[in-house]
Amino acid sequence: MATGSQAKPLAGKVIGIDPGHNRRNGSDPAYLNHLIWNGREWETCDTTGTQTNGGYTEARFNFNVATYLRKYLQRDGARVVLTRHNNHGVGPCVNRRSQIINHAHANVAIDIHADGGPSWGRGFTVLEPVADGPNNKVIKSSERFGRDVRSAFLRHTSMPTSDYYGHDGIIFRDDLAGLNLTTVPKVLVETGNMRNATDARLLTSARFQRDIARALEAAIIRFLR
């Protein structure tokens, strides 16, 4: 018979999930474009995100994957902290998203996105933080988590590493509030390219969205074990 810890591999853990953007971000440009400090420089509060050529929005995709992932993590015994709880609002700003997860003292966190790259390009990329002060103590752990995410994507999904962005599925970024301001281990994953027809067919599929959520679940369990 399985023990409680085996049945609930994330019991007692707190996991942060940031589904990027929000469906109505474009409806309030004054809010969206006001400047926030990202740890190195000023950037806008957020953006609208990208979409497929057929109009399926990144905000919708991000929230769908986050919803599946939350379900799987709660089943594993985790307490899940989301930066937004629906897909019909505006914001919050990217710095506020970091604050929500930091204040929850998450054991690890994932920022979920999809890219709007060149139409010929395919694949996923894991974005890693660069030390800038607030995140100094979690750089090495974030790098380890990023490797776990990359491995899990290759194992649990059919999405290849990006052929147009980063190197072998990894890139380091020092200009994103979500990574610059984090005090918990965190990476951002561009799960595929919405502007590529092959990737778009996958990303708009509920089955593939669940595959991504299971890959992230596996990465989180591996990292925390």
Image (cartoon, rainbow, N blue to C red):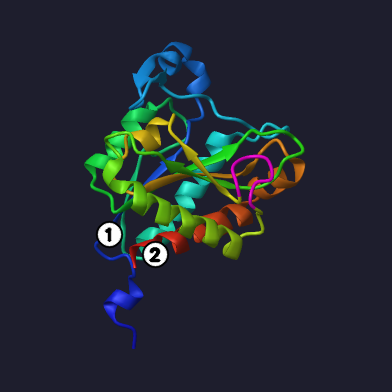
Q: Nearer the viewer, residue 115 or 161?
A: 161
Seen in the image, is 55 located left or right of residue 155? Answer: right
Q: Circle 2 is placed at which residue position?
A: 221
Q: Secondary structure at mark 1?
A: loop
Residue 187 relative to residue 165: left or right: left
* Span of residues in magenta: 161-167
Q: Residue at x 36, y 59 (%)?
A: 74
Viewer-closest of 12 and 116: 116
Q: Residues within 10 Å of mark 2 (few under 14, many from 20)?
A: some
The residue nearer to you, when weighing 72 against 112, is: 112
Q: What's the residue at 34%, 63% (across, down)?
A: 224
Reading the chain from its start, which is encountered first: label 2 or label 1?
1
- Magenta stretch: residue 165 in it? yes
Asked whether residue 48 is in view, the answer is yes
Q: Main secondary structure of the magenta part?
A: loop
Please say if the residues under marks 2 and 1 sit with CB atoms less than 8 Å apart: no
Amino acid at pointer 2: Ile
- Element under disc 2: helix
Q: Is residue 175 above or below residue 153?
A: above
Q: Where in the figure is residue 191, as x and y percent of width and height?
A: 58, 46
Q: Determine the residue located farthest toward the top in the rendered image.
A: 30
Which residue is at 58% across, 50% downward?
169
- Name above or below for residue 43 compared with residue 201: above
Pointer 1: residues within 10 angstroms few (<14), some, or many (20+)? some
